[in-house]
Amino acid sequence: MNRPDPGVVIEQATPADAPYIATAIMSAVGYECCDSLAGADYTTAHVHGLFEDLARRTDSQYSYLNTLVARTPDGRVAGVCIGYDGADLPRLSRAFFEKAKEVLGRDLTGGDPETTPDEFYLDTLAVWPEHRHRGIGGRLLLAQAARGKQLTGKHAGLLVDKENPKAEHLYRSLGFRSAGERPFLGTMMNHLVLD
């Protein structure tokens, strides 16, 4: 049952939100993927630190500048949505590749880009468990898509795991439509867009 969360506002993130942004990224990509990223010599705490550092920067795809947060009346973060111009991904991802090499000793360059230059990419969405089923995720997505349209004039796009029909149902209920498939970390995902 969806119960609206009264008083929750969607606003621009700040550098102080970096720990929440890092947690959201790890939740969205999955902790199994984060374990793999850490490898045998590091822990998920190192991965969290990497994403936290990237969230504080201004030149990263995970920057607070690219992030909207849902904030409760008492100032707590209830959810996070990261989005950026797909044309900027090559520039923005350099910070991630450099930090992964520095912090984890991993060269992660190469691979398929998760977005294309013609869209505003909705990279990460996470809502904390105690705030789910209250419409916050949908509000974050639509606010970020509107922000992207205003900044770039481009439609919003996102990827959803084929094994996550609940998430795909949410996106479709908000007006997203199928635009084919795209690879992400070696797995084919459904690509959805919102005009």
Image (cartoon, helix red, strand yellow):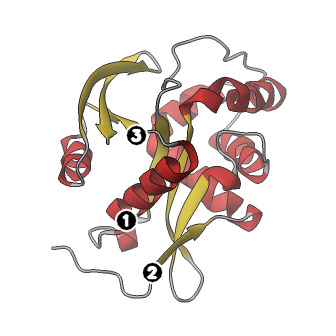
| Residue 30 visible to an observer of this rendering | no
Which of 194 and 115 lies nearest the eye of the viewer?
Answer: 194
Please rate how many residues cluster around mark 2, counting C-alpha atoms within 10 Å: few if below 14, some from 14 to 19, many from 20: many
Of circles 2 and 3, which is in front? 3
Please give the residue where the numbered disc 2 appears in the rendered image.
8
Q: x, y percentage for residue 139?
A: 37, 65
Which of 172 and 124 lies nearest the eye of the viewer?
Answer: 172
Q: Residue at x 70, y 32 (%)?
A: 92
Please rate how many residues cluster around mark 1, counting C-alpha atoms within 10 Å: few if below 14, some from 14 to 19, many from 20: some
Q: Residue at x 79, y 23 (%)?
A: 101
Q: Residue furthest left?
A: 1
Please give the residue where the numbered disc 3 appears in the rendered image.
155
Label ID, residue 139: 1
In which quarter of the view is residue 18 placed?
bottom right
Secondary structure found at label 3: loop
Of circles 1 and 3, which is in front? 3
Lower position in the chain sequence, tag 1 or tag 3: 1
Does residue 29 lie above or below 143 as drawn? above
Q: Quadrant of the N terminus?
A: bottom left
Lower position in the chain sequence, tag 1 or tag 2: 2
Give me the C-alpha separation between circle 2 and circle 3.
26 Å
Are discs 1 and 2 less than 8 Å apart at CB? yes
- Asked if residue 65 lies left or right of residue 121, the reply is right
- Asked if residue 108 lies left or right of residue 83, the reply is right
Q: Residue at x 30, y 69 (%)?
A: 135
- Asked if residue 36 lies left or right of residue 144, the reply is right
Are discs 1 and 3 less than 8 Å apart at CB? no
Which of 119 and 134 lies nearest the eye of the viewer?
Answer: 119
Does residue 1 lie above or below 155 as drawn? below
